[in-house]
Amino acid sequence: MEASSVDTRLAVETPDGIELDLIPAGPVLRAAAWLIDSVIRAGMLIGLGFVLSALGAAGIALLILAWFLINWWYPVLFEVLAGGATPGKKAFGLRVVNEDGTPVGWGASIVRNLLRQVDFLPFGYGAGLLAMHCNSRFQRLGDLAAATLVVYRDWSVTSARALPPGPAEPPPLPLAPAEQQILLTFAERGSALNPERIGELAGIMTPVTGLTGVDSAERLLAWARWLKGQAR
Amino acid sequence: MKQEQFVASRKQRWEHYQALLAKLTQREKLPAAGEFPAQYRRLCNDLAVASARGYSLGLIRQLQSWIRDGHALLYRSRPSLAQNFVAFFSRDFPSLVRAEWRLLALCSLLLFGPMLWLFWQIGSTPEFVYRVLSPEAVESYERMYARSAGGRGADNDVMMFAFYIMNNIGVSLRTFAGGLLFGIGSAVILLFNGVMIGAVAAHLSFEGYHQNFWTFVIGHGAFELPAIVLAGVAGLRMGLSLLLPGPFSRLDALRISARRAVTLLYGVIAMLVLAAGLEAFWSASPAPAAIKYVVGGLLWLVVLAYFSLAGRGSTSRAN
């Protein structure tokens, strides 16, 4: 696993010889997810309390078992059986995975959730918060012991948009794949940026395009159309 | 090949992959499921080509997101415990416990040591019990064992079963987790339980409640006390890996030991469920004292024999 230096992206190489990007989620989002889960757990117990307390001793027995399950096993059951996310995590688009990007199994999920007890110390997840800030992957102690990560389920900031129609022309000099990629990505992002920002970014390329601001952007867009091979 | 041509030439295959993925993710049984790995690998190939040719990040991230879902489907681990249930209890669990005999001895000492000490103390000076327990607690224990077991009613048995599950498994899970604090948490919980159980047992034994007390605890104690000790072993295994990581980094040592510890914990939980059943439905039953002693003694023998003999001679995963 390789950490990039400009953001929290982790590149994990799969057995198929390609790299998957994992973006670990930070403490604020995870705390919010935990809060939602706490509300859901409390709601479940209150609801069950109303129903089961009407059933006498057997109901109380079931209620105690439900309390035990919800208190200790709620995160484990959801993480293993429901695609790596409790409802709270799901609401924020988070997911628990092994460090190699595969879904968590029973062993890892049990370890990370039982060690929550220690992460919670001395109060309010103090130890967990400290641990999260001591590594680049936002792992609390339970995550470190279980070799798990909490990552964003879907994090793409750009999607493969079509470029706006217009003239296409070949760039005046051959581009390396990485340079071509930057140019294409800039062009695809264009509709998501405001004109001032587009002009500012395109201005960086003034030495190559020979133009400034929006004119430079138009020139870059024309090259991108040619490189992408978009039909007019 | 330019990006648009690339996309157009593969569009149909990608749509097929997505449809297959969506169906398989919903656990649908498909005759075509066998072609999924091949489809997945071709998509991986597409991603590698797209990255090498410098196609846009939009396209690459799109491919990555499809691959990520396929990767999760293809490389998910099967819950192995359910399949290896028999192998686990007949071989892996007892041999793992034997492999940890040093920690087992230490944890037994941490739990049973204080018990013996309190028997000696309270036997010579009965007032010593009040240094451990409050007078109110002592009185409530005396009331609890003032009459012989039985006549509690089936409803109460079920309720107590649930309570024992919640309480005892909760304690053992906490004992395990406490091990992460360099083993101190586990050790403290074991010592604390040893002191409390020892004080209550010694006081009741010397104050004339011995018959009611021992007939109640001897049966389920055979599973409960060893289970608590083993929860301590699991915790200390983790704690020790941080103190003495051996040839590994501390983090790697912790990960290896956590895997081992959680395997122990499966056995501990099974033992405590068994103990809760015995405690609720057998220990509280009105069977004659002699039978309770005989059955209880046999249960201790079974547990000791299980851990010393089961799984010997077979090649074990634990070693």
Image: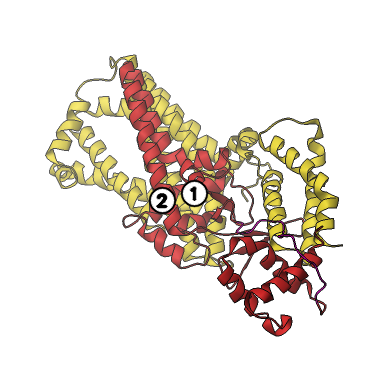
Residue bounds of the magenta highlight = A156-171
Q: What's the chain of the residue with tag 2?
A: A
Percent position (x, y) of residue A7?
Answer: 56, 68
What's the residue type where badge 1 is placed?
Phe
Q: Is B120 left or right of A11, judged from the image as shown?
A: left
Q: Secondary structure at mark 1?
A: loop
Percent position (x, y) of residue B274?
Answer: 45, 29
Q: In front here: A185 or B240?
A: A185
Percent position (x, y) of residue B282?
Answer: 38, 21
Residue A32 is tagged as 2
Is B106 inside the magenta-drawn segment?
no
Q: In front here: A149 or B87?
A: A149
Task: Tell me the CA gap for discs 2 and 1.
Answer: 8 Å
Is circle 2 on the same chain as circle 1? Answer: yes
Specify the quadrant of the image occupied by residue A183.
Answer: bottom right
Colouring style: by chain
Q: Is B196 left or right of B281, judged from the image as shown?
A: left
Chain B palette colour: yellow
Say which residue appears at 65% left-offset and 47% top-offset.
B317
Q: Please rate how many residues cluster around mark 1, counting C-alpha atoms within 10 Å: few if below 14, some from 14 to 19, many from 20.
A: some
Q: In front here: B237 or A49?
A: A49
Q: Are marks 2 and 1 in contact (CB under 8 Å)?
A: yes
- Residue found farthest to the bottom: A207
Q: Secondary structure at mark 2?
A: helix
Q: What's the chain of the residue with tag 1?
A: A
What's the residue type where badge 2 is placed?
Ala
Q: Is residue B104 visible?
A: no
Residue tagged 1: A92
In the image, which lettered chain appears red? A
Of labels 2 and 1, earlier in sequence is: 2
Is A161 inside the magenta-drawn segment?
yes
